Amino acid sequence: MFCYQCEQTDRTGTIAGCGGPVGNCGKDAITSDLQDLLLHAVKGIAQYASRARALGAPDDEATEFILYAVFTTLTNVNFNPTRFGGLLREAAAVRDRVRRRYEEAARAHGLEPETLTGPAAWEPAADQDGLGRQAAAEGVRKGIEIVGPDIVGLRALHLYALKGICAYAYHANVLGHRRADVFAGIEDALAYLAEEPTDAGALLEGALGLGRLNLKVIETLDAANTGTFGAQQPTAVRITPVAGKAILVSGHDLRDLAALLEQTKDTGINVYTHGEMLPAHAYPLLKAYPHLVGNYGGAWHDQQREFAAFPGPILMTSNCIIEPHASYRRRIFTAGPVGWPGVRHIADHDFAPLIRAAQALPGFAEDGEEQYITVGFGRDSVLAVSDQVVEAVRKGAIRHFFLIGGCDGPTPGRDYYGDLALAAPQDTVILTLGCAKYRFNWHDFGEIGGIPRLLDVGQCNDSYSAIKIATALADAFECDINELPLTLALAWTEQKAIAVLLTLLALGLRGIHIGPELPAFLTPALVDELVERFGLRKVGDVEKDLANALERA
């Protein structure tokens, strides 16, 4: 195996990346190899799907499979090699179907169908040894001895951004929201990677094109979430237990949570959110369920300790699973793209096994002392008071805005984000999203003229809200977004953050702070290019970064 797709990657060797029997995320070599092959296979589907769509014969079902398949390869999503074996066989069947569709469409237009090579012609081996040999030839560093590390790094930037894009598009799609131009963009981008491009300039511009594509995707996801569950509303969320039977829901998938809430109503079972599910409490349709009683625990990397202490079953949706400890392995369930060997998987939203487990387990014996945090400052909530915000800035009551968010993680250096938030002066406002908020969302930051100093915008999936807030402020002040008194400090762990970063760069934002480490797939030359062109910088010393930010306030 070789993998350097996430911030957890091993940086102790000559070449940064996980290359041993098990990666730092817990992914073993067999699973890693199968994921590489699945990505190779979906490129082959995309080669035909892109051409079929151009001829007026799209196969949206095939692209939906691509979204799901690619999502399973993100960091901390699926670790089950058996599932990947099945997905490889399904990918070959989907590719053959789309090929026939393309050939029929070409002939209907009086064209001779192309005979495609590369991933489009690839067939999975019949056994694991054969698949292992194939994976050795199709890994992310393929061709590095010919094209060099910069080109391989740019290809990886494309691939990992596409992983994030597919994850966001999957979330929107399962709620019934999809766009033909987004599906076309994903197909075209994967087909482009299948050609093994070597032009550095074209690859960099293509990466910015993926940023623009992701903007469409997160706009669609925003419409899916708010259209299905209502616009977020400021909501106080209990963070201490309520006596009674209990289920804990982690991950990101609001549809799974909604289905579980419906199936558990009137059962006497309380439902708690965990990690990135915290913002669910702000959606009117979800918080209308009285048995959605609160949030338990914090960010994903603390789950082994928190899940072990939780007195009920756990449902892991979409992503952020890590190896289940023996203390709760028999009471954790997965859904959607998530998987772990030996862990029970729930398909088709039938949560009866999870509910039976909750009824059999003790739950919380008594109420905890009441404590609350406030969420729900999505774009609708913030823009509703934009006149107050603008007036506060003009009067000098608000000097600066900090957007401090993204993915939390266990690696050193992440204290930076909490330290920055806590050190921000009283005349500043902090917007946050993603699970990095758990570094500081417990703190009472107070208010400025009735405006909370901490505005929780939501999940990492809600990055469109943050973008709309920033652009609305720029419009109100009739200035460029880079002229706002705004500092972006982004924590990244996995591939959705790469997609969002490219969106911000494509929108022209400069001076973004990212960390705690820069992506390992970006070579020094690529980092220099991003620094020169976009002013991208690694997070550093809190005091210095704070002073630099406020200097231009």
Image (cartoon, rainbow, N blue to C red):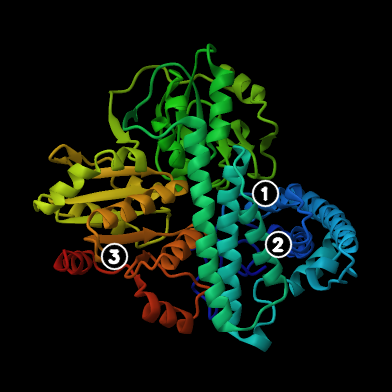
Q: Residue at x 59, y 81 (%)?
A: 151
| Type of the residue with mark 2 | Leu
Mark 3 or 2: the one toward you: 3
How far apart in space, not on screen, are marks 1 and 2 (Cα)? 11 Å
Q: Is residue 333 left or right of residue 306?
A: right
The secondary element bearing badge 3 is classed as: loop
Q: Quadrant of residue 302?
A: top left
Give the tally of numbered discs: 3
> Badge 2, how many Cα within 10 Å: few under 14, some, many 20+?
many
Instruction: Report helix, strand or loop for mark 2.
Output: helix
Towards the viewer: 213 or 438: 213
Alpha carbons under labels 1 and 3: distance apart: 37 Å
Question: At x 90% / y 58%, what residue is drawn?
Answer: 104
Read off the residue under disc 1.
Answer: 68
Residue on which the image places disc 3:
480
Label 1 vs label 3, nearer the camera:
3
Q: Is residue 221 left or right of residue 31?
A: left
In the figure, 119 relative to 352: above or below? below
Could you say which disc has been placed on residue 203 in the image? none
Counting residues from the N terminus, which is met first, the one under dot 1 or under dot 3? 1
Name which residue lies at 61% across and 74% down: 155
Task: Report x, y in % for residue 34.
Answer: 73, 60
- Judged left or right of residue 97, residue 143 is left
Q: Residues within 10 Å of mark 3 (few under 14, many from 20)?
A: few
Q: Residue furthest bottom?
A: 146
Q: Which residue is mark 2?
A: 39
Give how far across and how far down residue 107 sits, in percent: 91, 63
Question: Viewed as shown, does residue 286 lie left or right of 38?
Answer: left
Q: Are marks 3 and 2 in contact (CB under 8 Å)?
A: no
> Can you say whether 335 is above or below 367 in the image?
below
